[in-house]
Image: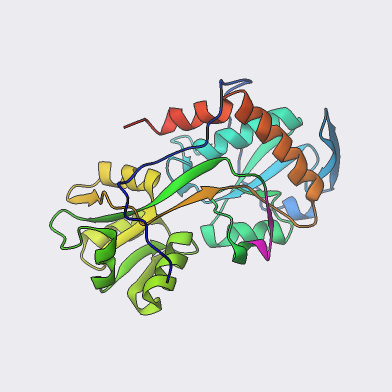
Amino acid sequence: MKKILTAVLSFSMIACLAACGSSSSSSASSSTADTATVDETEAAGTGSFTTIEDGKLHMATNAAFPPYEMTTDDGGYEGIDVEIAQKICDKLGLELVVDDQDFSSVITSVQSGKSDIAMAGLTETDERKKNIDFTDTYATAVQSIIVTDDSDIQTADDLANASSIGCQEGTTGALYCTDDYGEDHVTTYQDGATAVQALISGKVDAVVIDNAPAQEYVENNDGIKILDSAYTEEEYAIGVSKDNPELRDAINQALKELQDDGTVQQIIDKYIKAD
């Protein structure tokens, strides 16, 4: 049984320093990247690495996970992960291409060579490491519990009494809840918004999801709240193919520079306001 954290909810992010470079831009999703010519790129201080399409970095994500990745009114993409990925591309001299898909497909997309990286509020786990490699972490996130205002569930410990817990399919929240309470007590949905609607309509007793999107859902829906008692805490990293360690190393160097000069933290602070 995975030990549940019951400390007062807090959302902490790794410390990083000031913004540099141009603002994040969005690109259309590509479904033909796996057939493109491999590009060999030399960036200052990073050595050579390959991408699946000449001069571009394909990012597999699920753009229904605010504030990390989401769609804009004009059909583009924005969010913490999108902006950090754009800054990495700026450093590596690449164009960012966002490959929007179901969350359950992002790891497979990288593993099969259809995308270069998976960046979707992705937590490094032993199971996922069997299929892809991970960069250094860039953010720390809390798994929160959403319930209705009149719910009998008041703390994380009370989840043991829930008849059904809603989660987004393929997420660590779903994995952890299944491990703790069994498959019979967990109902998965394609995205977090659908899980929250299931909670509002009484189909599940609680929803376990990352704190940042949880805040968005609670802000936009009446009658639900986030418990002060957190479920667990985890760190986000970028998934890269096991066959491309050079790209992983180049991203790690770019990411370190963006952390050291404050860019990563500035992007996080732009989307997640301090309490």
Compared to residue 23, the image places residue 230 above or below, namely below
Name the residue located 52 percent from the left edge and 51 percent from the top edge.
62
Q: Quadrant of residue 202?
A: bottom left
Tell whether 108 sits left or right of 143: right
Q: Position of residue 27 (x, y in %)?
A: 61, 37
Q: Is residue 146 above or below residue 39?
A: below
Residue at image coords 34%, 64%: 166
Side of 203 where 122 appears, left or right: right
Residues rendered magenta in the picture: 129-134
**Residue 185 at least partly seen:** yes
Residue 76 visible? The answer is: no
**Furthest residue to the bottom?**
184
Q: Is residue 156 left or right of residue 107?
A: left
Residue 181 drawn at (x, y percent): 36, 74
> Residue sitting at 79 percent across and 54 percent down?
35
Q: Is residue 174 above or below residue 184?
A: above
The one nearer the camera, 54 or 124, is 124
What quarter of the picture does the C terminus occupy? top left
| Quadrant where the image shows the N terminus | bottom left
Please tell me how many numbered marks the rendered image carries.
0
